[in-house]
Amino acid sequence: MIDFEKLEKAYNENRFYSLQLEVGDVCYQGCSYCYMNALTVKKNSLTNKKIYEILTDAKRLDITAIEWLGGEPLLRRGIYSFLKKASELGFRNNMWTGGLPLKDKSTARKLSELCKVGLISFHLSTLNKKLYKILHPGRPSKDIDDIIEGIKNLLELNYPPNQLLNSITFTGYQTVEDLIETMEYFDKEFGIKSCINVYHTYLRPGTDSKELNKFIPSEKSVAKAYKHYINFMDIKNFPMNCVNKQYCSATIAALNDGTVSPCATIRTGCDENLNTHRLYDIVMKNIEYLTFAKFKDKNNLPDGCKTCKLNDICWGCRSRSYAAGLGIYGKDPRCFRSK
C-alpha cells in the first residue's frame, strides 16, 4: 500500500510523499473522540475549484498519494470527480471513510474502481455493541453490521483485502482484549489488517477536559496493545504512531478550513491559508516546519527518544505532543518505551 522506495526518497530530499486532503467536516458516525469535531451540518469546506487547484499543486510537488479525509469524505458532493481527477494525474487514491457509506453497493463499486491503486480504510474500533454506543452517542449499534456489510460489498467486487485497512482508535473506554478481538476478527474473517491510533486529542471545544481524559488509555494498556500488535503483524518493531517517522515527515495536510498543517490531527498550521494562497507557495515557504526538519537531527529529539532503539523509524506522535500542550516537538505523552 506504500511505495517505500518513493517514501524514503521523499524523506531524504525533505519533500512530500502524501497529501492529507480534507474535503469537508460533515460526518454522521458521531465518534465522541473525533479529533476535528466532525459535524452533522457543513461548517468548513474547500470549494471544488480549490480542490482541483490543490491536486494540480500536489502534482507539481511530486506527491505520490492523496489521503482523502473528512469528516466523512464520501458525503462530499463531487467526491468521485475529485478521485477521478487524482487518478488522471497519477496519484494513488487512499480513501479514509468511517465505513457506513460502503453499505451502498454503488458507492462500494465506484470506490473499488477509483481506489484500485491505493487503499480503502474504514473505521470500526470495537465489535462490542454496548461499547460502540458509548463511543458513538446517538448512533445505533446496527452501525457495526452496516460497516461489515459494506466491507463484504467491496470484497464481492474482488477488491483486494490487503488494500483494505481497519483504522482503530484505542481509548481508555475499551480493554486490550476488546482491541485484540476486533483486529483478529477482521484478519481471520476477511484477511484485513488493522492499524492502531492511540487516543491523543483532548482539544475538543465545548467538552470538559476531565471528560476527555477518560478517553486516555493507561500506559500499561498501550504497552500491552503494542506488544500484541507486533506479534499480530509479525514485525520486529513498531513506532509510536500508525506510520513511521518517514511517512510523518513526508506528509502534509490541507484542512477543510484552508489551513495547511504538517498533520491533519494538528489543527493549526502555517500563517498562510489556502483560501487566499496556493498550496505550492505555502509549502515552499514553510517546508522546514511541515517536514519536522528539526527532528531529522536526532540530537534534537526529546529526552528518552535520543537513545531509543527505534529512533530510526520513530520520533513519537507529533500530534499527541501538540494536543498535550507540549508543542509539536515535545515528548509523545503516550510513549511507554522511553522516559
Image (tube, rainbow, N blue to C red):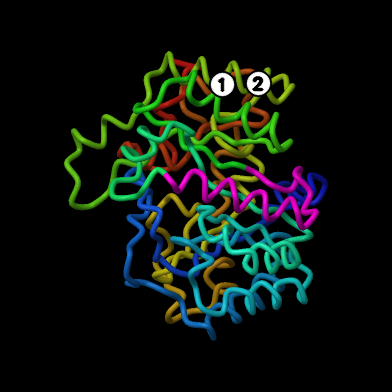
Q: Observer-nearest residue: 51 or 169? A: 169
3D distance between C-alphas at marks 1 and 2: 6 Å
Magenta span includes 162: yes
Kindly identify the residue that appears in the image at 64 percent across and 64 percent down.
Answer: 105
Label total for image: 2
Kindly identify the residue that appears in the image at 51 percent across and 41 percent down.
Answer: 124
> Vertically, is 323 above or below 49?
above
Residue 212: horizontal and vertical position, in percent? 26, 37
- Mark 1 vs 2: CB contact within 8 A: yes
Amino acid, disc 1: Tyr
Kindly identify the residue that appears in the image at 79 percent across and 49 percent down.
Answer: 160
* Horizontal side of residue 295 vs 159, given as left or right: left
Please, what is the dominant secondary structure of the magenta stretch?
helix
Among the 4 quarters of the image, the one containing residue 271: bottom left
Residue 56: horizontal and vertical position, in percent? 66, 78
Q: Observer-nearest residue: 30 or 305? A: 30
Mark 1 neighbour class, 10 Å CA radius: few under 14, some 14 to 19, many 20 or more: some
Q: Which residue is mark 2?
A: 230
> Vertically, is 183 above or below 133?
above
Residue 164: horizontal and vertical position, in percent? 69, 47
Mark 2 neighbour class, 10 Å CA radius: few under 14, some 14 to 19, many 20 or more: few
Magenta span includes 121: no
Q: Which residues are magenta?
A: 142-165
* Horizontal side of residue 151 vs 339, given as left or right: right
Q: Observer-nearest residue: 301 or 221? A: 221
Secondary element under disc 2, as helix, strand or loop, is helix
Q: Which residue is mark 1?
A: 226
On residue 64, the disc is none
Kindly identify the residue that appears in the image at 62 percent across and 36 percent down.
Answer: 194
- Which residue reaches farthest bottom? 49
Amino acid, disc 2: Ile
Residue 206: horizontal and vertical position, in percent? 18, 51
